[in-house]
Image (cartoon, helix red, strand yellow):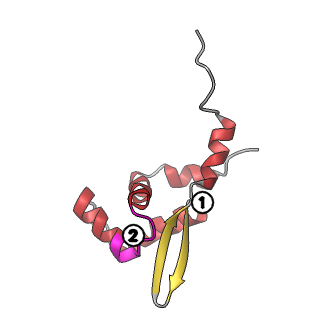
Amino acid sequence: MDADPELFRALGDATRRTILDELTDRDGQTLFEICGRLAMKHGLTSSRQAISQHLAVLEEAGLVRTRREGRYKFHHLDTSPLRALVDRWPIDREAPP
């Protein structure tokens, strides 16, 4: 079983990893909130459209799930796709002598 190439693509970008960090820190954010946190905490002043495209890549990889409430769309972190990486390269193995 091979990890999905979309997962590696999603994790390969520093901005997307920062978005995941922000969702780890505070799950369930709107696009507006994510953009604000990226600008204030990380100095990332990407456009809303660019951040939305990054979120789409993360969603395609299964790392972000969304839910709608009225006119708001909330983004939630989903780490379950990372299981394929851990299964492929276990982290609890003993180091060789």
78 is higher (above) or lower (below) than 8: below
Judged left or right of residue 40, residue 84 is right
Nearest the eye: 92 or 44: 92
Q: Position of residue 31 (x, y in %)?
A: 40, 75
Judged left or right of residue 96, residue 1 is right
Q: Residue at x 64, y 34 (%)?
A: 89
**Considering the numbered disc 2 on the image, is that residue within a helix, a strand or a loop?**
helix
Residue at the extreme right = 1
Residue at the extreme top = 97
Nearest the eye: 56 or 24: 24
Q: Give the residue at mark 2.
A: 50
Numbered range of the magenta stretch:
26-33
97 is higher (above) or lower (below) than 34: above
Question: What's the amino acid at mark 2?
Answer: Ala
Identify the mark nearer the N-term, 2 or 1: 2
Q: Give the residue at mark 1.
A: 61
Q: Residue at x 48, y 67 (%)?
A: 55
Q: Position of residue 88 (x, y in %)?
A: 68, 37
Q: Position of residue 83 (x, y in %)?
A: 64, 47
Between marks 2 and 1 in the image, the one whose residue lies nearer the viewer: 1
Quarter of the figure that contains the C terminus: top right
Give the main secondary structure of the magenta stretch: loop
